[in-house]
Image (cartoon, rainbow, N blue to C red):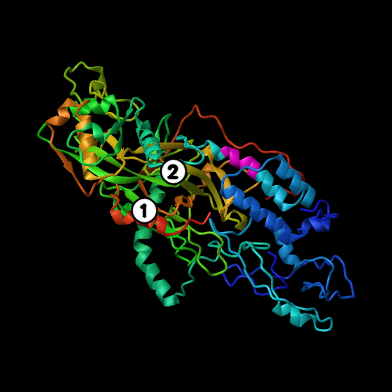
Amino acid sequence: MPKGKMIPRNVFQVEFMHYPKHQQCAIDCLDQMELNGVMPDSESEEILMNTFGMYSHPVRKHRRMLYWMPKFKHASPWRLPESVPNNAFELAKLAVTRMCTVDPSSVISLFETKDVEDAIEDTWIVSGQSPTQQELLQNHPPEEPIKVEGPFRIFLRDQCVGYFILRAEAKPQPPPVKREYIDDVGSIKLWFTGDLEPDDMALIKPTSVHEQEDGIILAICATGTSGRDSLLSWIRLLVNTNPNLANVPVLFTQASPVGDVMTTGQHDETTSVKTVP
Amino acid sequence: MFHFRGVQLLGGPQSGFVLAQPFFLCFSRTSSVRVLQPKNLCSTCKYSCRYIHFGTSQRKIQVLDRVGVTPYSQRSVISYNKDHELLPHHPWNKAVTSRSISVAAAQNLFWEKDPKGGYGHKKKHSQKELIRDGLKELRTELIKWKDEVREKFEDDPIMVRPGDMDKIWILNSEESLEQWVVTSDKDHNEGFSSASLTLSPTGHGLFSGRINTQVPKDGRVKRAGYCNIRTIRPRKSFKRETYLDWSLYTHLELRVRGDGRSYIINISTAGYFDIMWNDIYTYALYTRGGPHWQVTRIPFSKFFLNSKGRVQDKQVSIPRDHVVSVGISAGDRINAPFRLEVDYIGVYWDPSHLETFAYEMYKVPKFTAGH
């Protein structure tokens, strides 16, 4: 871009956007950079300053980009690499790790269906489960069935991963322990609100984050084929760490209250319209 | 912007900017015409000028940073290049017929004409209809007004204690969903995304749909693909508009279950004057994805000011006593279905949060930063 020619020489030229089409072209270029997440640097600022001058719109936009882009670069609590891998296995690992951040003690295990006897499919399985979930599964009554639901969608930047969950029906919270003694100080009404001191919740075991009102999430996984057989292999592999699982009936369901189950038709839908950057 | 010679600008709602221009400036005038080089004519000076410049009113608009651009799409004017030769004695013929490609954003020159920015539907009601409908509502409004008067004299102001979280919008019934308005770019033929707000199987509000980044071929829209939900404005009795007062709180809390995509939270604090009509404070809502619910607490100091989709240069912290509505938008340019379940949106007070505003301001050359 030519230096000096398009720099305004007086107030009026500044005011009326000297060389508007050229400035707009530069702005569009910077727009494209912004959309693709490319940060401008001092060299590009020099080019723009020499071409359009200090008070021009491309230079102003450049400065705005330098101010705002770093603020949002690391704003997400869940870090993802700048370009997410295209490989399904790597994506699945990232996805399951992300979903298991809800419980920091989760353990992500990588399995192969080859290790299970009578397995028809040959694929990888990424599974995430925490000790809390293992305990919940251990205490699960053997008569009640648990369900394998999925595949649900999770997006990592622009890539989509299908994951499955192992879910048990929600159990209502146990009632709080009633006060036994009349002389208990807690039965004096609070002066300010006129309520009784709330029932002592300290004696109940606090519910974990996995026990939700729509179900108890016991494990999450993503498999290479997302097929019925790979899920069966996953259950068999989970029995190694959860012996009680062998006694509990496991159902494979189509619909789920937790999320929108992806059907095979929807896999193609995502690629049919080209994303315009 | 570079719209030439007062040719009909956008057919759309914001075509009102070819107005009386106070400035008539020409940079240079030459009586000799260079036929070899096609020249653009200026409507104001009617001379062929040495520099390529356009209607001065449009140029003036460039300086204003508060651009009237709809979120996630820019209206553009595309016209077609035609070769033309300049005939010195008939400048106007050529001026009217030849146009050039320009990419512009719709901008208002001096004032915002319409609080809805041209996107509302103007329905004509007869006086009789209005009176009839008004009388129907009279009874409920009187009851509401009675309650307000009683509240004013009898009730004590609310007391917020540290760590208090007050739920403002709970999406658990059809009735609660009626407080929300769902919009997408398909509404005004500016895109093909669809969205809906329904009750999920677990009984919570479900904002789902599909973002479609395909741009409609109407020559105006540059980018497409957004959907949003927004609460309706709080009103007192007799439909008087009022504000939500959140000055006692420091954080906005949402319990959501997303699909890993990022959404945008918009808190509108529309003011009385037209410059403030489109004041929206924004921040991103990052979702973890997965079957677990997440409780996100965003401090009000993190919200930054933007207007009609453009981040403003001169930033201020959100006026918490002046909140009109809260909205959630999906527009992350990923061409795929999205799904966001919302349990509640509330406000939280954390007395240890002392930050007033998270964005530092810098001194810039005079007249460069926007209003």
**Mark 1, residue position:** B208
User: Taking the image as drawn, is residue A142 in sight?
Assistant: yes
* Pointers 2 and 1 within a single chain: no
> Mark 1 falls within which chain?
B
Under mark 1, the amino acid is: Ser
Q: What secondary structure is found at the residue carrying circle 2?
A: loop
In this rendering, position of residue B325 left or right of residue A100: right
Q: What secondary structure is found at the residue carrying circle 1?
A: strand
Q: Position of residue B76 (x, y in %)?
A: 60, 65
Q: How many marks?
A: 2
In this rendering, position of residue A116 left or right of residue B80: left
Magenta-drawn stretch, dominant element (helix, strand or loop): helix
A126 over A7 or under it: above or below: above
A206 over B324 or under it: above or below: above
In this rendering, position of residue A198 left or right of residue A63: left
Assess disc 1: are there few (<14), some (14-19) or many (≥20) residues with their C-alpha within 10 Å of its C-alpha: many
Distance from the alpha carbon under mark 2 to that under mark 1 = 26 Å
In the rendered image, residue B300 lying in the magenta stretch gets the answer: no
The label nearer to you, 2 versus 1, is 2
At a point 36% along the width and 64% down the height, the residue shown is B137
Q: Which residues are magenta?
A: A65-71
Q: Nearer the viewer, residue B18 or B73?
A: B73
**Mark 2, residue position:** A86
